[in-house]
Image: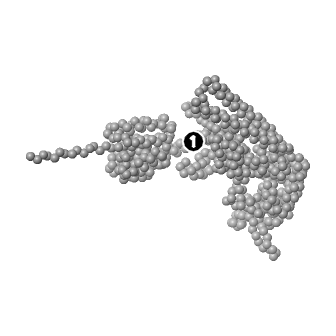
Amino acid sequence: MARKPRLQTAAPVVTKAALYLRVSTGRQAESDLSIPDQQRQLATYCATKGWTVDQEFVEPGNTATDDKRPQFQTMIDAALSKPPPFSVILVHSFSRFFRDQFQFEFYARKLARNGVRIISITQELGDDPMSLMMRQIMNLFDEYQSRENAKHTLRAMKENARQGFWNGARPPVGYKIVGAEQRGTKIKTKLEIDPVQADKVRLIYRLALMGDENTGPMGVKAIASYLNERGITTRNGGRWGVSSVYYVLTAPTYVGEHHFNKRVAKTGEFKDEDEHVILAVPPIVTRDQFDAVQRLMIQRRPTTAQSQAYCGPTLLGGIIFCGQCGGAMTLRTGRGNGGQYRYYTCCTRARTGESGCKGVTMRQDAADGAVVHHLENRLLEPKRLAAMMENIIDRRDAFVQRRSKHIADLRKRATETDAKLQRLYQAIEDGLTDPRDKSLKSRIFELKEIRDGLEGEATRAAAAVERMGTSLTPALLKQFAKATREMLRSENGGYRRDLLKAVAQRVEVTPEGGLRVSGCKVELLRTISANNGVESAAVDVHTRVPEWRALLDSNQRPLA
């Protein structure tokens, strides 16, 4: 009798699942659905289904509006491998996976083609078309809710900035975050000047305007090299780079106007200025200093026409402007009386015609000669120079007094910091504290950095005051006036041009054909000092006076 064949039973297929756990912020982890709570619920769900947990991917503090999540990408790479190590990605809700409907469907279909499903334990759906449609609707609602939350959060942060409170980002160099007031359990914060770091910011502005020992304005790269060569570090103890110096020199924060909501968070693109919120903060430099630095940087920018004109061979290039529309004037050529002439012409008029501007055209030799004649016979007269400089020299003396007081304060704080260090060392010697304590080492390093920074800044400030030398005397002003007249008549066009632009920063051609010459007293004083071996008295007391006009008729009537 033949035996019946024994039936073979197939081994049960074990479903392997990957758990994806995510919260958007640290605050959400504390007050909303925490990572451990998600892990517990997902593990329980797998146990009831008889599934095996293969891997866990934890994403703390990352938004689900995009796929720039390290653990998310690691999970996707594993799920798309051949064969995948798991067949299910388990989440608490679909919003944990993505809050963007298009991106959700993009990844869901890629995973499905490789045999991997996305399952939510709180939104269980099947694989039929109706379930697919319901999932898409849920994702659309998640995306809408995410956008609404972002809108309301941004609105609250903008109002917080309007009230003068800081929104939690890392403060700019020169500032520190301090508690301002408490509202319920929440502490509102504001920005306060960090004395040590703020002195570095002021030094950067002085270098940009005056240079080292009045050698002339320094560029961004030269400033970074100067700081690094002298061991002046960033607030983290690192080296200065071009970008960090550029930020310090261009951020309006340092004149008390911090711009919040400047960029789009995802793309980094700049928003329109009407969307910015101005947060009032304590200023570190004056508005005059900041504006002067911006003008210098624009003049040096190689891509701008003003920069090219300013550095070009034309005597008034880059500083001559139309008095009617305010636009720059450019050099044009023409022929008349059998000869060739060169003219300064309003760029707006040359480009758009008289409908844009009716500004006048002036011969180059006449304009150059008139400006040089004006400077020689009006500005460079010793008595007039003395009268112009009187106010700013008085302010120089006041600055020296303030600077001396500041130096004394720096040295006092350095002494106090050193005393704290000595007390810590004494506590270690007496066995009152464990020298292996990491927080103790960090505190000692912090105190050393503060002390050394204060001592270094005090030494640099004292040296700057000492280098300022004696006040300007009548003899010195007379010497400067004589030397400058000779240089203005010199055949060395390049030096003559540079000297003229250092003394006169703007020349306007009036509609009547006259010339209005204006300049900055600080720049004039710096030029006098640089040409006579005297350190500039204008450090930190920059006051821009747009027009000299000591004798009203000298600028009012047309110059021949």
Nearest the eye: 222 or 369: 222
SS for dot 1: helix
Left or right position of 214 against 276: right
- Indicate the position of residue 441 as horizontal and vertical percent values: 61, 32
- Indicate the position of residue 431 as horizontal and vertical percent values: 61, 24
The answer to which quarter of the image holds residue 366 is bottom right
Q: Which residue is drawn at 58% across and 30% down?
A: 436
Q: Which residue is drawn at 42% across and 49% down?
A: 77
- Tag 1 residue: 157
Residue 551 is at least partly visible in this image: no
In the rendered image, the residue lying farthest to the bottom is 338
- Indicate the position of residue 438 as horizontal and vertical percent values: 58, 32
Left or right position of 526 against 246: right
* Amino acid found under the numbered disc labelled 1: Met
In the rendered image, the residue lying farthest to the front is 429
Residue 311 is at least partly visible in this image: yes
- Indicate the position of residue 433 as horizontal and vertical percent values: 60, 26
Left or right position of 496 against 104: right
Q: In which quarter of the image is the C terminus?
A: bottom right
Residue 437 in the image: above or below residue 353 = above
The answer to which quarter of the image holds residue 156 is top right
Q: Residue at x 38, y 42 (%)?
A: 54
Circle 1: is it few (<14), some (14-19), or many (20+) Cα within 10 Å?
Answer: some
